């Protein structure tokens, strides 16, 4: 995915911070085992959240090991044990990563993307055999997204719906989701797509790439600050609605596993990341209340 879904680290308890690091290192190690060492560059914060959320869905406590890290060969690091849930998250991530790389290549991505696609192809094919329904869903939504790009769709809801459906599909591979779990993942997927679009707005304008915000508010002239100021009210309304929907859904979910990481991410990390990208500054988190940024 994109790496935007992360907790607000300055406002984490120490125990939660180290658990978060252990999740990240465990996923990185699993990617190396599953896809080859070269693909460990694709380790994403988003997968930490998905892995923690999946463990909560399945009510499975994570176990910890101490192992050597490829970046720190002489220092052993604590990381989560690579159980079946973590392996599943990594395997499914190969499908998302493959389509993301493929999409980047279509958009004119550089040679490194083609190398990544070549390296990833074998793991992608294995994942397709194991999760055919997920692959079909991701292929369908990326096809729909490409159609929106060709037609210059200007509906923020229609375009971001594609990633909302993909995120729900990921969660559904573990078990049948409740209404609130579905809502949380759907809104999270929409947020990931839209925050990436907001982050890439200036680059997409310069490279003539599709960006739903450039179509929805079509008066961008190269001045990013002025553009965000003109459309501050509309942009805040979009992101506040999504964040509050996530918060309301999350409040109704019984969280037993990795609660510190999940709660910090929903209440603090996502709003802080939104503010950071919107204003270009690092934020320290929000109170556990109706979210505003």
Image (cartoon, grey):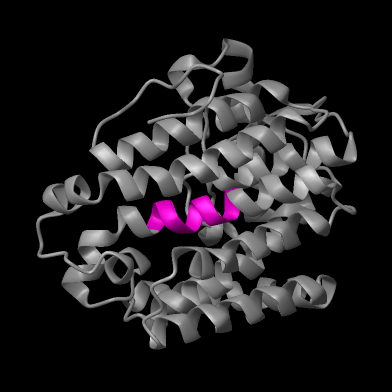
Which region shows up in magenta? Answer: 188-196
In the displayed structure image, the side of residue 167 where residue 102 appears, left or right: left
Image coordinates of residue 3 in percent, x first then y, are 48, 48
Q: What secondary structure characterizes most of the magenta part?
A: helix
12, 209: nearer the viewer: 209
The quadrant the C terminus occupies is top left
Seen at 12% across and 49% down, the residue is: 226
100, 221: nearer the viewer: 221
Residue 191 part of the magenta segment: yes
Image coordinates of residue 238 in percent, x first then y, are 43, 49
Q: Is residue 5 visible?
A: no
Seen at 71% across and 62% down, the residue is: 92
Give the quarter of the image for residue 110: bottom left
Q: Is residue 229 visible?
A: yes
Residue furthest out toward the top: 14
147, 231: nearer the viewer: 231
Q: Is residue 200 above or below residue 78?
A: below
Image coordinates of residue 105 in percent, x first then y, are 40, 80
Q: Is residue 100 above or below residue 22?
A: below
Give the quarter of the image for residue 121: bottom right
170, 27: nearer the viewer: 170
Residue 155 part of the magenta segment: no
Seen at 40% across and 87% down, the residue is: 151
């Amino acid at each position: 995915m994109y790496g935007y879904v992360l907790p607000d680290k300055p406002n984490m308890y120490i125990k939660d911070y180290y658990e978060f690091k252990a999740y990240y290192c465990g996923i990185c190690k699993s990617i190396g085992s599953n896809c080859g060492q070269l693909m460990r560059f694709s380790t994403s914060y988003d997968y930490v959240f998905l892995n923690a959320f999946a463990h909560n869905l399945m009510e499975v406590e994570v176990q910890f090991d101490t192992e050597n890290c490829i970046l720190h060969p002489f220092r052993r690091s604590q990381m989560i044990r690579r159980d079946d849930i973590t392996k599943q998250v990594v395997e499914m991530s190969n499908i998302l990563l493959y389509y993301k790389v493929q999409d980047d290549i279509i958009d004119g991505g550089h040679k490194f993307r083609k190398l990544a696609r070549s390296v990833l192809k074998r793991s992608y094919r294995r994942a397709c055999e194991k999760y055919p329904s997920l692959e079909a869903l991701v292929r369908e939504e990326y096809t729909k997204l490409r159609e929106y790009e060709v037609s210059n769709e200007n509906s923020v809801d229609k375009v971001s719906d594609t990633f909302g459906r993909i995120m729900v599909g990921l969660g559904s591979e573990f078990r049948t989701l409740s209404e609130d779990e579905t809502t949380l993942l759907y809104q999270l997927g929409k947020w990931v797509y839209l925050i990436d679009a907001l982050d890439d707005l200036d680059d997409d304008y310069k490279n003539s790439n599709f960006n739903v915000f450039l179509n929805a508010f079509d008066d961008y002239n190269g001045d990013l600050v002025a553009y965000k100021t003109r459309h501050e009210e509309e942009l805040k309304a979009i992101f506040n609605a999504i964040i509050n929907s996530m918060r309301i859904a999350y409040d109704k979910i019984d969280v037993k596993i990795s609660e510190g990481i999940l709660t910090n991410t929903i209440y603090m990390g996502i709003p802080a990341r939104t503010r950071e990208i919107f204003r270009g500054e690092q934020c320290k988190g929000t109170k556990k209340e109706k979210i505003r940024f």
